[in-house]
Image: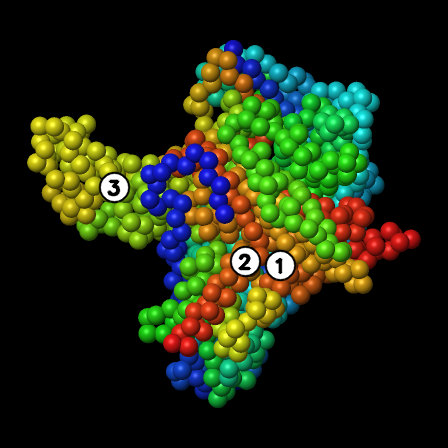
């Protein structure tokens, strides 16, 4: 089970809950699982959030791998100048 | 408004064009003569990107009216390299990586050449004040000043030889 | 000076300083920037801008303008589709397409002084300007609000009557100017403050500042009768221009071909469109190509800037210097539409510190000022100004050396960043040590001088990129990418290709393709090009090498395993065939027709795992107590750059970031009059640093490689603008003995601070 943490951007969907244990081997599976628990959250995170998987930031990419003991932080997508 | 026929010398060659009374030298160079090396960054003489030499004097071409250059000698960045050889200042700008986007570079080179023509052995402070009329937003001026000082040294050596 | 950790010894090109491939064009005036391009029969486009900071557009009458001989087209927002609110997910910073469209041309309301209202295309500039004066716009002026805190007030004039604050526990029922609240919490901050030995706190303010690129926005657009369009423009991304034009005008993306001009600086300010959709609409309406060039005044009034801000920071620490608690509140001006960089500011604010308890709150607030655009590490310098000033005050209160305090609380590999993830392969403590051990840090100061230290963090990004490599018959190579070269990236692309192929860099010609000749690439921004596009270039070179090895294997009649690529040539390592002499790239290229056709490879990728960057800056300044004038007397910036591909251009990025940050700290600010009109929309009054304002800017490059990049590169362009605001402010604190917490530290402000000290 991956340890998943979401920030305040996602709280309107999660009712303020921020940590989850989720069975997911890829980013897409994670999105699907979170959307199953909190309808609408999947589309929101797909468009607006990046995935920090064990410290490495994946801005998008559905097939990025998530390990069984991975820590995944959802953070707002980063732009730049 | 009828246009004025202007005869001038640009980079050593005779040049003629028609100018409306309010046309700037910068617009004449860019739009009438096709010399787009001088750039418009502000149109108010504050950025120096349009620097050219007019009868041996460094000017912002955006502040000179085109009809004023009748019979004058204009030198632009396009005339700086001679016979397929870069001027030492141009070469030193490249060696020192003294440009990033390159937009201010033509004006800085024209102004730097004017400096070295008038003061072959400037101090760093003199170079900084001479070039204070040329804005560069990319480099922080460090490498520009190093390139100018290095070119000055090389030109002095050339003259001594 | 470069401090190299774990540097492979086998690199021949990466890490050297060759002359940039586009250099000769740029020192001779030949390089073609946005305004240097012309099309036969082109018209001149001009924009009518709002004189009001906030007003309802009652009517726009263009009849008299259209009647003027020589006027070929007039457009207003009525000529554009009225888009629905939709977040565009282009992989870049999210933008709302409706807001983007409304910013290009106002519809119903003008929201800031300079907001575009109508545009004309005419046979000359004089006719176009006369036409603008003949457009009659009837406005109903509305109360306006410029500064962020008044805009948050419940009785503020509301810019968008539909806007409800996002991010609150309880969704609001009344519209306001607060677009969004960000919040990031860790631990128990109240308990931590109660237990702290030492507490510092202050309120900090900054003003809106502009990116200040010297080249104003410029483009030429041509709409053909078959609906195909061409756009030539200066931007940070030709694909960005194409997508936004297609969305704003309701076109098929492939009908628009955008050719990137040379770009005269961007710093984030050219990551969006202003002119291009209007030029296309004018071209469609007139049947002629249309050229549009902004004036400097337009650039200040209608593009950029980044946010002005009001911030509150409180830090708690133990007597031995462990920072145990922090609260940070950031209120950012977004300009006319939501989307200030306050989110990134919240994430970066405490990113250099390992703190157990904190609360960070950020507010994104719309104001009657130009819609903010990205500016180099968007948001981070503003937050760092506040946090680094507070850390400096904490060091003074604790009697600790400011670097020792930062080292004690520094994030390291394995530290959980304040914004969530766990750091790896970062070079922050090495960078702190480089400044601590520098000769500069140990040097004495003179009277009226002060020394300031500040640190900064930026994420850097990766993203989607395409690179193609074509090998010519003589073995020379063309490298084509889709990223405009703002600061020398052609050089780094050529160098990475040359290094991989094993050829001299002079044999590689880097080019930037238009949108029809190279695959999609996200724009040049977020410090992504050397990392992500560089990765695509290296992979394309590897693909070329595989092809070359396969051809050599066929020629030698050996297995692929028995062909290695070494120093630019194929070598046969089959022990059964010792007679096979190596074949150079040139030799293989000469036979390409007989061995399978042209040698060419393209790679597309979406690069993940960009390495974050840290910078530590040291500033010495001197204050003239008579005039309040400040001179920067010495400056050293250290940064973890991963691996410097072309060290001169890395140094240049650091020096440029420092110069912009010093300008932000000392002089730059948008100034508005009581009617909300910008008062200093020109370089004379908006005072950016000139050569005589700065000393030499010393750099120290620390190289802790990013394992995700073939050569270890990390983005370098944004980090160096993060620390200078606070480095200057902290040096000022040292010089005058008073904390100045509002930027800019202009001479009148310094004099006032000196007077208050005397008083």
Residue at point 21% right, 33% down?
C564
Q: Are marks 1 and 2 in contact (CB under 8 Å)?
A: yes
Q: Nearer the viewer, residue A2 or C730?
A: C730
Instruction: Tell me if residue A76 comes above or below residue C541 in the rendering.
Output: above
Quarter holding the N terminus of chain B?
bottom right
Residue at point 64% right, 68% down?
C133
Report the chain holding disc 3: C
Q: Are marks 3 and 2 on the same chain?
A: no
Label annotation for residue C567: 3
Q: Distance from label 1 to label 2 (Cα)?
A: 8 Å
Dot 3 surroundings within 10 Å: few (below 14), some, or many (20 or more)? some
Q: Distance from label 3 to label 2 (Cα)?
A: 36 Å
Residue C29 spot, x, y in % from top left: 43, 66
Report the chain holding disc 2: B
Mark 1 lies on residue: C694
Q: Distance from label 1 to label 3 (Cα)?
A: 44 Å
Q: Quadrant of residue C680?
A: bottom right
Q: Secondary structure at mark 3?
A: loop
Q: Are marks 1 and 2 on the same chain?
A: no
Quarter holding the C terminus of chain B?
bottom left
Label annotation for residue B142: 2
């Amino acid at each position: 089970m991956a340890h998943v943490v979401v920030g305040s951007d996602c709280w309107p969907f999660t009712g303020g809950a921020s940590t989850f244990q989720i069975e997911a081997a890829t980013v897409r599976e994670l999105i699907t699982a979170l959307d199953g628990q909190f309808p609408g959250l999947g589309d929101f995170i797909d468009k607006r959030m990046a995935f920090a998987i064990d410290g490495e930031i994946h801005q998008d990419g559905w097939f990025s791998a998530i390990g069984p003991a991975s820590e995944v932080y959802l953070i707002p997508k980063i732009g730049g100048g | 408004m009828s246009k004025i026929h202007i005869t001038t010398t640009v980079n050593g060659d005779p040049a003629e064009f028609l100018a409306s009374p309010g046309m700037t030298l910068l617009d004449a160079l860019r739009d009438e003569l096709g010399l787009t090396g001088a750039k418009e960054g502000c149109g108010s003489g504050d950025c120096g990107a349009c620097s050219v030499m007019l009868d041996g004097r460094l000017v912002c071409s955006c502040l000179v009216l085109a009809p004023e250059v009748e019979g004058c000698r204009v030198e632009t960045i396009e005339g700086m390299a001679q016979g397929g050889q870069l001027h030492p200042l141009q070469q030193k700008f490249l060696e020192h990586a003294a440009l990033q986007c390159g937009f201010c570079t033509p004006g800085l080179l024209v102004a730097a050449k004017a400096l070295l023509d008038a003061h072959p052995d400037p101090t760093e402070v003199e170079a900084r004040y001479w070039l204070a009329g040329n804005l560069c937003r990319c480099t922080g001026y460090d490498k520009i000043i190093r390139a100018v000082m290095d070119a000055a040294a090389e030109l002095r050596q050339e003259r001594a030889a | 000076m470069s401090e190299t950790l774990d540097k492979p010894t086998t690199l021949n090109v990466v890490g050297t300083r060759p002359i940039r491939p586009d250099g000769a064009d740029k020192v001779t005036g030949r390089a073609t920037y946005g305004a240097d391009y012309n099309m036969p029969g082109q018209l001149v486009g001009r924009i009518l801008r709002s004189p009001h900071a906030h007003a309802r557009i009652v009517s726009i009458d263009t009849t008299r303008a259209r009647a003027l001989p020589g006027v070929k087209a007039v457009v207003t927002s009525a000529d554009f589709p009225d888009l629905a609110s939709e977040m565009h997910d282009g992989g870049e910073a999210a933008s709302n397409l409706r807001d983007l469209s409304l910013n290009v041309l106002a519809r119903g309301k003008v929201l800031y002084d300079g907001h575009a209202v109508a545009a004309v295309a005419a046979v000359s500039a004089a006719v176009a300007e006369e036409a603008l004066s003949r457009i009659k716009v009837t406005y109903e002026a509305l109360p306006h609000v410029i500064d962020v805190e008044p805009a948050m007030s419940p009785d503020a004039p509301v810019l968008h009557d539909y806007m409800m604050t996002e991010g609150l526990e309880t969704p609001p029922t009344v519209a306001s100017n607060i677009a969004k609240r960000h919040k990031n919490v860790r631990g128990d901050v109240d308990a931590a403050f109660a237990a702290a030995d030492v507490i510092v706190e202050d309120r900090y303010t900054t003003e809106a500042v502009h990116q200040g690129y010297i080249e104003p926005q410029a483009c030429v657009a041509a709409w053909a009768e078959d609906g195909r369009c061409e756009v030539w423009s200066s931007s940070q991304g030709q694909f960005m221009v194409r997508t936004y034009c297609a969305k704003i005008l309701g076109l098929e993306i492939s009908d628009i071909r955008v050719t990137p001009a040379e770009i005269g600086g961007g710093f984030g300010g050219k990551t969006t469109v202003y002119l291009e959709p209007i030029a296309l609409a004018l071209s469609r309406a007139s049947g002629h190509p249309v050229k549009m060039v902004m004036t400097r005044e337009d650039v200040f009034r209608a593009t950029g800037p980044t946010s002005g801000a009001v911030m509150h920071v409180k830090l708690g620490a133990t007597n031995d210097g462990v920072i145990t608690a922090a609260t940070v509140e950031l209120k950012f001006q977004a300009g006319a539409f939501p989307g200030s960089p306050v989110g990134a500011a919240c994430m970066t604010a405490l990113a250099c510190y390992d703190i157990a308890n904190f609360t960070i709150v950020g507010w994104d607030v719309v104001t009657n000022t130009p819609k903010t655009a990205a500016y180099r590490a968007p948001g981070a310098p503003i937050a760092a100004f506040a946090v680094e000033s507070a850390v400096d005050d904490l060091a003074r209160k604790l009697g600790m050396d400011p670097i020792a305090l930062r080292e004690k609380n520094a994030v390291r590999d394995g530290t959980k960043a304040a914004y969530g993830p766990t750091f790896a392969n970062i070079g922050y403590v090495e960078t702190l040590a480089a400044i601590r051990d520098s000769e500069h840090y140990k040097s004495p100061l003179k009277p009226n001088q002060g020394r300031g230290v500040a640190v900064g963090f930026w994420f850097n990004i990766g993203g989607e990129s395409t690179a193609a490599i074509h090998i010519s018959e003589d073995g020379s190579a063309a490298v084509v990418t889709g990223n405009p070269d703002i600061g020398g990236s052609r050089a780094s692309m050529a160098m990475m290709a040359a290094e991989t192929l094993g050829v001299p860099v002079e044999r590689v010609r880097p080019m930037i393709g238009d949108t029809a000749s190279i695959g999609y690439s996200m724009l040049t921004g977020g410090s992504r090009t050397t990392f992500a596009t560089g990765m695509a270039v290296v992979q394309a070179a590897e693909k070329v090498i595989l092809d070359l090895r396969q051809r050599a294997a066929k020629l030698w009649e050996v297995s692929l395993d028995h062909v290695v690529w070494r120093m630019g040539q194929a070598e046969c390592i089959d022990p059964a065939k010792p007679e096979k002499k190596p074949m150079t790239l040139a030799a293989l290229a000469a036979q390409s027709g007989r061995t399978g056709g042209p040698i060419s490879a393209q790679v597309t990728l979406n690069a993940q795992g960009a390495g974050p960057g840290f910078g530590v800056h040291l500033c010495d300044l001197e204050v003239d107590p008579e005039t309040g004038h400040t001179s920067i007397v010495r400056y050293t910036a250290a940064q973890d750059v991963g691996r410097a591909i072309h060290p001169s251009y890395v140094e240049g990025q650091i020096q440029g970031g420092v110069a912009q940050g010093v300008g932000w700290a000392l002089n730059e600010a948008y100034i508005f009059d009581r009617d909300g009109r910008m008062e200093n929309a020109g370089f004379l009054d908006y005072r950016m640093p000139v050569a005589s304002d700065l000393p030499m800017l010393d750099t120290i490059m620390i190289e802790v490689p990013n394992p995700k990049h073939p050569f270890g590169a990390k983005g370098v362009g944004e980090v160096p603008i993060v620390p200078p605001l606070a480095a200057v402010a902290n040096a000022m604190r040292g010089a005058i003995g008073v904390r100045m917490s509002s930027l800019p530290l202009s001479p009148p402000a310094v004099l006032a601070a000196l007077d208050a000290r005397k008083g």
